[in-house]
């Protein structure tokens, strides 16, 4: 198995090398071999992570193979070097967020830590002779507000928010990944020099390191580039308003070197019954709800449902009254009843499981830093 992987890496490296040199025919042959081996590996592996990694790799090689084949058909003589192709350039633009802290329900600890790290230094840099935390890792189950927290913090300091998911960096052609990261950071530094704080948000941070299983086209270099950029941020004399915030729901896939770069490692956990109650009320505030709806009861029925699930439950319950209105030809939808909510809950499986929480808590015991 690992021998097969080694051969796949070997073939892929050769392919990339030949490809860069412009030896198209030879590159095509090597890509084909690498793809064959990868498809064997996909059949053999028991690990879902590796399965994804192999599949993703194979998809990339197939794409490149198709490109090379069509290049051959279109212009048989001209050879194009991969790394000079303009489509490889990183296309990523910052956004401005309009999320407010009040949109994030519960998560008081996480909010406090993020505010302390981002908002206070922005307001009073003079109070931070030792600098401030520039790397924050948020980990927790899906749909519990990691992305929302980052958006709220960015909004408060009027920051530009660059979202970097692994796909954005990695789907660019092989060997370009580390260049993409360098480009992004230098772009961000230009923004800062214009007086805006910048947040670089690495979503699904685990996929950056999970890729290391099959280091072929520069993923390891991309990751190392990122670490290097982060070390630059940690330089106490610089005091830049440039933050790297990463989010993951599989922190155990991260490696130590990566984890160490984040001064703050914050658990963004599932809502308790009290918070679920608030969330349900929040999302129904603009809806017409019948008197028979017992929100406490709904909150106690929804353990392991994430805030995102709860939002969807409210939406489903509401839509069912609208559907009924149209079906029955009424003028207005009736109020949402308890049974609409119960039905919506029954139809939707919770996104969170006990196992997942236990695993995250275990990881937190070792790595949480707040
Ligand atoms: N704490 C919260 N308060 C209110 N709404 C929330 C909260 N957390 C999540 N939501 C709702 O769920 C949606 C998804 O949340 P978000 O994208 O922040 O989750 P996440 O933790 O980043 O999940 P993932 O790990 O899947 O990326 C939000 O847009 C919001 O509607
Ligand atoms: Mg998210």
Image (cartoon, rainbow, N blue to C red):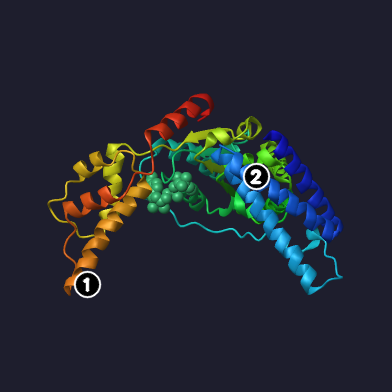
Mark 2 touching mark 1, by CB under 8 A? no
Q: Earlier in the sequence, mark 2 or mark 1?
A: 2
Residue 168 placement (x, y as % from top left):
62, 54
Outermost residue toward the top?
366
Q: Where, by quadrant of the figure, is residue 24 drawn? A: bottom right
358 left or right of 302 in image: right
Residue 287 placement (x, y as % from top left):
24, 59
Q: Residues within 10 Å of mark 1 (few under 14, many from 20)?
A: few
Count of numbered badges drawn on the protein: 2
- Say which quadrant the N terminus sits in: top right
Q: Where, by quadrant of the figure, is residue 87 drawn? A: bottom right
67 left or right of 139 in image: right
Q: Residues within 10 Å of mark 2 (few under 14, many from 20)?
A: some
- Residue shown at 53% from the left, 44% from the top: 123
Label placed on residue 40: 2
- Residue shown at 41% from the left, 37% from the top: 269
Looking at the image, is mark 2 or mark 1 nearer the viewer?
2
Q: Which residue is mark 1?
A: 326
- Residue shown at 72% from the left, 56% from the top: 173
* In the rendered image, the vertical position of residue 335 relative to residue 128, given as above or below: below
Please name whichever residue, 48 or 82, is drawn nearer the observer in this view of the structure: 48
Please name whichever residue, 54 or 284, is drawn nearer the observer in this view of the structure: 54
Residue 107 placement (x, y as % from top left):
39, 39
* In the rendered image, the vertical position of residue 55 relative to residue 272, given as above or below: below
For residue 335, say whether it is visible. yes
| SS at circle 1 | helix
Label placed on residue 293: none
* In the rendered image, the vertical position of residue 65 relative to residue 4, given as above or below: below
| SS at circle 2 | helix
Outermost residue toward the left?
292
Q: CA distance from mark 2 to mark 1?
A: 53 Å
Residue 71 placement (x, y as % from top left):
77, 68
């Amino acid at each position: 198995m690992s021998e097969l992987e080694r051969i796949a890496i070997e073939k892929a490296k050769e392919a990339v090398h030949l490809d860069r040199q412009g030896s198209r025919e030879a590159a095509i042959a090597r890509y084909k071999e690498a793809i064959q081996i990868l498809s064997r590996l996909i059949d053999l592996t028991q690990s879902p992570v590796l399965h994804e990694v192999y599949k993703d790799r194979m998809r990339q090689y197939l794409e490149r193979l198709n490109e090379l084949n069509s290049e051959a058909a279109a212009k048989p003589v001209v050879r194009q070097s991969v790394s000079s192709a303009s489509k490889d350039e990183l296309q990523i633009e910052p956004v401005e967020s309009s999320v407010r802290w009040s949109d994030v329900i519960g998560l008081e600890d996480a909010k406090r830590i993020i505010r302390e790290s981002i908002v206070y230094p922005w307001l009073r840099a003079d109070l931070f002779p030792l600098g401030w935390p520039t790397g924050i890792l948020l980990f927790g189950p899906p749909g519990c507000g990691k992305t929302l927290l980052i958006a709220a913090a960015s909004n408060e300091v009027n920051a530009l928010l660059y979202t970097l998911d692994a796909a954005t960096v990695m789907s660019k052609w092989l060997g370009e990944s580390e260049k993409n990261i360098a480009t992004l950071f230098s772009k961000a530094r230009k923004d800062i020099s214009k007086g805006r704080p910048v947040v670089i948000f690495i979503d699904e941070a685990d996929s950056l390191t999970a890729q290391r299983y099959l280091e072929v086209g520069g993923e390891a270099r991309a990751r190392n580039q990122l670490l290097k950029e982060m070390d630059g941020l940690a330089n106490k004399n610089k005091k830049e308003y440039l933050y790297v915030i990463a989010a993951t729901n599989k922190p155990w896939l991260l490696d130590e070197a990566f984890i160490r770069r984040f001064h703050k490692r914050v658990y963004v956990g599932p809502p308790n019954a009290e918070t679920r109650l608030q969330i349900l009320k929040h999302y129904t505030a603009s809806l017409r709800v019948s008197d028979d709806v017992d929100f406490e009861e709904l909150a106690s029925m929804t353990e392991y449902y994430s805030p995102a699930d709860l939002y969807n439950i409210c939406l489903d319950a509401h839509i069912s009254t609208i559907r009924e209105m149209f079906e029955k030809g009424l003028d207005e939808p009736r109020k949402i009843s308890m049974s609409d909510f119960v039905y919506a809950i029954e139809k939707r499986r919770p996104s969170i499981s006990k196992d997942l929480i236990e695993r995250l808590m275990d990881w937190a015991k070792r790595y949480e830093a707040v």
